Image (tube, rainbow, N blue to C red):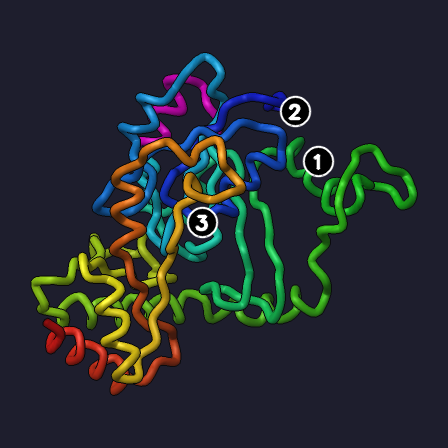
Amino acid sequence: GKLREGDAVIVPANTYIASILAVSHSGLRPVPVEPDEKTFNISPEAIAKAITPDTKAILAVHLYGQLADMEAIRSISEKYRLLIIEDAAQAHGAVHANGKKAGNLGNAAAFSFYPTKNLGALGDAGAVTTNDDALAAIILKLRNYGSATRYQHELTGYNHRLDELQAAILNVKLSSLDTDNETRIRMAKAYLTGIRNPGITLPRYSGGSDHVFHLFVIRSRQRDRLQRFLLEHGVETLVHYPVPPHRQKAYAAWNRRSFPLTEKIHEEVLSLPLHPVMDPAELKNIIELLNAYS
C-alpha cells in the first residue's frame, strides 16, 4: 500500500466525525487542523503548518456541499509529496473551476449515498472513485471480503458491496442530479439575497457550481435562541454539528486540545431547510421569519 500503519493524515477539525473515524479505522493517525472560517472547510495555511516527516496524506472534506480549496491543497501536496483523499459525501456534482467534479480532484474520493444526500439511495450506500488502477483493484477486493475470485480471499476485507436495489435507484436518480443541484443553488441564492438580518451571517458563495448546497448553513451568536424562535413558528432546523470531533469521547486524547475556530463554528451554525422539492412559499416564509427575528 501507499500508507503504513501510524502514518499521519491531516484532517479537518471542523467536520462530521465519520471523516476522521475512517482514518483511525485504517490504522492511520489523524491530525486535526482548523478551518477557513469563511468556508468552514479545512484551511490550507493550517495544513502547511501541521506537516511533519510523518505526514503522508491530506483529507479534504467538501463540507456542506462546498469544494475545499483544492488548488492550494494540491500545491501543498505536490510540494511535500502527499496523497489527497477527498470526502465528497456532501458534494455530489460540485464542479471545480477547472471543470473537474468532486471525486476527481485527488488520489481517491469517498461518496455517501445516505438518503438525505444530494444523490441519495433508500438506505445506506457509498462509493469510492480513483484513477489509480492498483488502488481500485484493492478496493474491489476489500468490498467483497478481500476476494477477487470466489472463495479466494487475499485480504481481510469487508461485506461492503452496494446491493442491486440501491444501485438501480441511484442509477435512475443520477440523471436528475445536476437539475436538482441547480434547484438547490437557486433556492440558496433566494436565501442569500432575501435574508437581511444583521445578526445572521450567511454562507460564503462564489456564484458558481463549486457549492451544491447539500446544506444551507447560517451562523448566529444566538443560535439556540434563533432555533427555538423558528421552531415556535413551525420551521424545523438542524445543527451540523453540535459537538466537534475533538470534544467527543471517541477521541478523548484530544478533549483538552483547543481549536477555537472550530468550537466557535459549532456554537453558531444552524442549517435551514433546503431541498429540491421545497415549496417556494415555505422558503419565502422562512426568509420573512429570519428578517423579523431580533
As shown in the figure, which amino acid type bears the numbered disc 3? Tyr
Query: Where's the C terminus, which quadrant?
Result: bottom left
**Which residues are drawn in magenta?**
72-83
Query: Where's the N terminus, which quadrant?
Result: top right
Nearer the observer: mark 2 or 3; the answer is 3
Q: Residue at x 30, y 44 (%)?
A: 263
Residue 123 at x, y percent in the picture: 62, 67
Check contact, mark 2 vs mark 1: CB within 8 A.
yes
Q: Main secondary structure of the magenta part?
A: helix
What is the CA distance from the residue labelled 2 to the residue labelled 1?
9 Å
Which residue does the numbered mark 2 point to in the structure image?
A: 1
- Within-10-Å neighbours for mark 2: few <14, some 14–19, many 20+: few
Which residue does the numbered mark 1 point to in the structure image?
A: 138
Q: Is residue 166 above or below residue 111?
A: below
As shown in the figure, which amino acid type bears the numbered disc 2? Gly
**In the image, is 115 to the left or to the right of 294?**
right
